[in-house]
Image: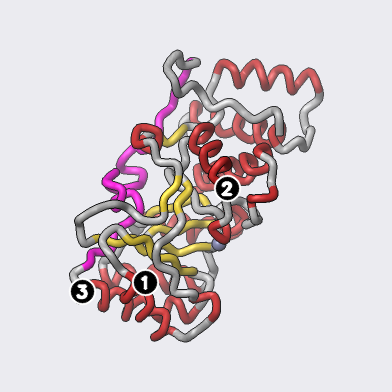
């Protein structure tokens, strides 16, 4: 991590505290942070999301026979490594919508996810239902998670998945406007959390697939992980290729090798502007 990166991350942490109203900084310090925030972006921002104007989506409009496998709520200390072994064996890339607190606990697994070519997405810090939250608390959930992922793997998620799929249109627009993050739900839900058994989960994933489908699953359930080999084989036999969210969106490979964010050293004069903390929260 470069000095510039460290600085933006540290400033971002200060902004989160302010946005969440936790008040760790005194009035003078808060003023200093505001002055710094005006001069510096607090976090590097995903850039492609703004360019494509995506606010929220549950599938991608494409004629390609591609689907995105997405796994929520990890990293899990047992099930995620087993899933990674399976994905490697089948040479399939997936997207992991990780929870910030889990990344903090299981940082090495998050690093392995990225090292093996998969994508990380933001799934909040505490996994709350966001619809009852004010904007400051929503941004705090998102920013803390962006930061812990940034610190773990040196790369920022470019998509966000609301816990339980629960987010208002206004909140999605707010996140798009302030953090360049589209809210990504799903078009195929095998309801694996109800524990219907691995073969049922696999069949639901296969049957629901269409071009551009986003398939929801959870790498916190052993039976879901056990369903993955059958699901991949079934999808492939129907002619589908399993890709990451960024690939499904046509943004190419997500990861350290391909910059999906930008650092801006000075305030910008264009319509985007630097990321400014939400002091109203
Ligand atoms: Zn979740």
Q: Quadrant of the C terminus?
A: top right
User: Answer yes or no: do the residues labelled 2 and 3 have beta carbons within 8 Å?
Assistant: no
Q: Earlier in the sequence, mark 1 or mark 3?
A: 1
Q: Magenta segment, which residues?
A: 240-266
Assess whether mark 3 and mark 1 are in contact (beta carbons under 8 angstroms).
no
| Closer to the eye: label 1 or 3 | 3
Residue 92 place in picture, x, y as percent: 29, 65
- Residue 154: horizontal and vertical position, in percent? 45, 42
Tell me: residue 243, above or below residue 143.
below
Q: Residue 247 magenta-drawn?
A: yes
In the image, residue 258 lies at what x, y percent? 31, 41
Q: From what the image shows, is residue 19 above or below residue 246? A: above
Which residue in the structure is indicated by mark 1? 85
Q: Is residue 272 above or below residue 54?
A: above
Q: How busy is the neighbourhood of tag 3: few (under 14 within 10 Å), some, or many (20 plus)?
A: some
Viewer-nearest of labels 2 and 3? 2
Q: Mark 2 or mark 1: which is in front?
A: 2
Q: Disc 2 or 3, which lies upstream in sequence?
A: 2
Q: Secondary structure at mark 3?
A: loop
Residue occupied by mark 3:
238
Identify the element where label 2 is drawn.
loop
Q: Quadrant of residue 54?
A: top left
Residue count near mark 2 (Cα–Cα under 10 Å), binned few <14, some 14–19, many ≥20: few
Question: Is 34 placed left or right of 160 in the picture?
Answer: right
**Label 1 CA crowd tier, 10 Å (few <14, some 14–19, many 20+):** few
Question: Pointer 2: what residue?
Answer: 168
Q: Quadrant of residue 18?
A: top right
Q: In the rendered view, does 89 fall on the left or right side of 64? A: right
| Viewer-closest of 165 and 86 | 165
Give me the residue at 43% from left, 84% from top.
198
Q: Main secondary structure of the magenta part?
A: loop
């Amino acid at each position: 991590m470069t000095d510039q990166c460290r600085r933006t991350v540290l400033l971002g942490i200060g902004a989160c505290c302010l946005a969440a109203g936790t008040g760790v900084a005194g009035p003078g310090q808060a003023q200093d942070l505001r002055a710094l925030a005006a001069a510096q972006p607090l976090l590097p921002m995903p850039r492609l999301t703004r360019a494509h104007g995506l606010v929220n989506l549950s599938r991608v409009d494409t004629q390609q026979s591609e689907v995105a496998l997405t796994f929520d709520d990890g990293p899990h200390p047992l099930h995620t490594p087993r899933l990674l072994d399976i994905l490697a064996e089948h040479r399939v890339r997936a997207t992991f919508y990780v929870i910030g607190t889990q990344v903090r606990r299981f940082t090495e697994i998050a690093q392995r996810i990225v090292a093996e070519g998969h994508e990380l997405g933001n799934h909040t810090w505490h996994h709350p239902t966001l619809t009852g939250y004010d904007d400051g608390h929503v941004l705090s959930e998102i920013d803390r998670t962006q930061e812990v992922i940034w610190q773990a793997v040196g790369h920022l998620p470019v998509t966000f998945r609301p816990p339980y799929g629960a987010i208002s249109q206004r909140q999605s627009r707010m996140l798009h406007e302030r953090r360049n993050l589209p809210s990504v739900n799903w078009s195929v839900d095998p309801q694996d959390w109800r524990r219907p058994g691995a073969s049922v989960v696999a069949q639901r994933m296969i049957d629901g697939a269409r071009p551009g489908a986003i398939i929801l699953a959870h790498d916190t359930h052993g039976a879901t992980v056990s369903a993955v080999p059958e699901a991949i084989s079934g999808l492939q036999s129907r002619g589908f290729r399993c890709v990451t969210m960024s690939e499904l969106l046509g943004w190419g490979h997500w990861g350290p090798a391909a910059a999906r964010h930008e650092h801006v050293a000075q305030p910008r004069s264009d319509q985007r502007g630097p990321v400014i903390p939400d002091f109203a929260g």
